[in-house]
Image (spheres, rainbow, N blue to C red):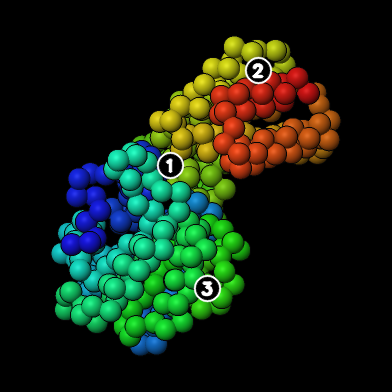
């Protein structure tokens, strides 16, 4: 069966390191209004054929997509007004195992020979989606579902191929497109989808949820919540990478009053490690947010950052320049494949010396 891409326990492009795959998650934090909107459409019998789930990474888009899929494929909700289908449900179990014949998950494939993911979703994978919908339904049930995680990783050819499917959708099919940057998608794709934007979850709700999970010390959880920007998945990833990300950020900001090339190089090497690819992205984000918080502190005297403010006097303009330097370095690294250790070391050293 074409869906069992993980039969050999291969890495999955739509799963963050150290986190459960969204199809294995049965609790969605927040987003009740988004679920209500979907359920209203479902109960009306006038379901739109394509939904675009948008919002920052880690906010719960993929988790919601699988909740929607379980419902359409016949899972039994605990309540008629909810998408809470339990893990014990037979449909849920087959969705989790990717063995449900009416579900297709479109994502970046893993190259076994090269031992890496493709950089984008190739058009030949989209052609498989077309074939999937042209075939007779593999199982009983009214609906067939295609989850695209993420639509941001479609190349131009595969985007055009998806557009053709959206323009002439087969009957009783649902496309669920997941995007953290919907503005980059073709306008014609966006216009054919019903947009469901997931908004930031309140900090207090994320903090309570992390406490229930038993995730680390209160100090680390507080820092993770502040850096999450309302995305529970990102908060959890930060806690799970606390030693690599949160402690490195705290140590670095706390040491800015002195020169410390050894610390800068140590952090740069840690973040350059291939196994820390997820942590590197979190560190980039966290450092940017921390610099921004210190800029506001210098301008207003109010501090809302994840750690204590830097014990060094700098003007708001200097902090803003540091933030811009980080943004430019990150863009350049992504665009031209710069040496990761050198890029991070030079950035940390330049911020320290400013």
Tell me the SS state at disc 3: helix
| Residue 236's disc number | 1
Which residue appears at 46% of the width and 38% of the height? 278
State the image coordinates of residue 257 (x, y, percent, origin top left).
72, 16
Which residue corresponds to the image point at 46% horizontal and 82% vertical from the top-left? 167
Location of the N terminus by quadrant is bottom left
- Which dot marks residue 255? 2
User: How much space separates mark 2 and mark 3, taking CA atoms?
Assistant: 48 Å
Q: Regarding mark 1 in the picture, which secondary structure is present there?
A: helix
- The local secondary structure at tag 2 comes to loop
Q: Residue at x 48, y 56 (%)?
A: 153
In three-dimensional space, the C-alpha distance between marks 1 and 3, rounded to whole angstroms, equals: 32 Å
| Residue that numbered label 3 is attached to | 189
Q: Is residue 280 left or right of residue 87?
A: right
The one nearer the camera, 236 or 139, is 139
Query: Which mark is first along the chain, 3 or 1?
Result: 3
The local crowd at label 2, few if under 14, some if 14 to 19, many if 20 or more residues have their Cα within 10 Å, is some
In the image, residue 3 lies at what x, y percent?
24, 60
In this orientation, which residue lies closer to the viewer: 217 or 245?
A: 245
On residue 88, which mark appears?
A: none
Q: Name the mark nearer the viewer: 1 or 3.
A: 3
Q: Percent x, y for residue 291?
A: 69, 34
Quadrant where the image shows the C terminus = top right
Q: Earlier in the sequence, mark 1 or mark 2?
A: 1
How packed is label 1: few (under 14 Cα within 10 Å), some, or many (20 or more)? many
Say which of 26 and 57 sits in front: 57
Vertical comparison of 306 with 254: above or below: below
- Residue 333, above or below 5: above
Q: Are marks 2 and 3 in contact (CB under 8 Å)?
A: no
């Amino acid at each position: 069966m074409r869906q069992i891409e993980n039969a050999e326990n291969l890495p999955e492009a739509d799963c963050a390191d150290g986190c459960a795959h969204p199809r294995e998650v049965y609790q969605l934090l927040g987003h009740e209004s988004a679920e209500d909107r979907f359920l209203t459409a479902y109960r009306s019998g006038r379901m739109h054929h394509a939904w675009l789930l948008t919002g920052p990474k880690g906010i719960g888009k993929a988790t919601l997509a699988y909740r929607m899929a379980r419902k359409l494929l016949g899972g039994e909700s605990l309540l008629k007004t909810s998408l809470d289908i339990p893990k014990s449900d037979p449909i849920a179990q087959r969705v989790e195992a990717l063995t449900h014949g009416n579900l297709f998950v479109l994502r970046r494939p893993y190259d076994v020979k090269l031992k890496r993911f493709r950089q984008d979703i190739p058009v030949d994978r989209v052609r498989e989606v077309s074939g999937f919908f042209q075939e007779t339904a593999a199982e009983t049930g009214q609906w067939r579902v295609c989850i695209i995680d993420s639509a941001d990783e479609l190349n131009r050819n595969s985007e055009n191929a998806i557009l053709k499917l959206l323009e002439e959708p087969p009957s009783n099919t649902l496309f669920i497109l997941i995007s953290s940057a919907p503005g980059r998608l073709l306008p014609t794709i966006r216009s054919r989808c019903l947009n469901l934007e997931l908004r930031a979850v309140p900090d207090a709700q994320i903090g309570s949820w992390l406490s229930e999970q038993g995730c680390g010390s209160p100090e680390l959880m507080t820092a993770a919540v502040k850096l999450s920007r309302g995305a529970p998945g990102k908060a959890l990833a930060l806690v799970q990478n606390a030693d690599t990300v949160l402690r490195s950020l705290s140590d670095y900001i706390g040491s800015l009053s002195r020169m410390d090339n050894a610390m800068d190089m140590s952090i740069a090497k840690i973040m350059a490690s291939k196994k820390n690819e997820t942590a590197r992205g979190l560190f980039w984000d966290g450092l940017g947010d921390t610099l921004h918080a210190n800029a506001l502190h210098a301008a207003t005297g109010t501090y809302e950052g994840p750690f204590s403010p830097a014990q060094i006097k700098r003007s708001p303009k200097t902090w803003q320049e540091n933030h811009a330097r980080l943004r430019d370095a990150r863009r350049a690294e992504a665009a031209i494949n710069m040496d990761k250790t050198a890029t991070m070391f030079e950035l940390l050293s330049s911020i320290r010396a400013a």
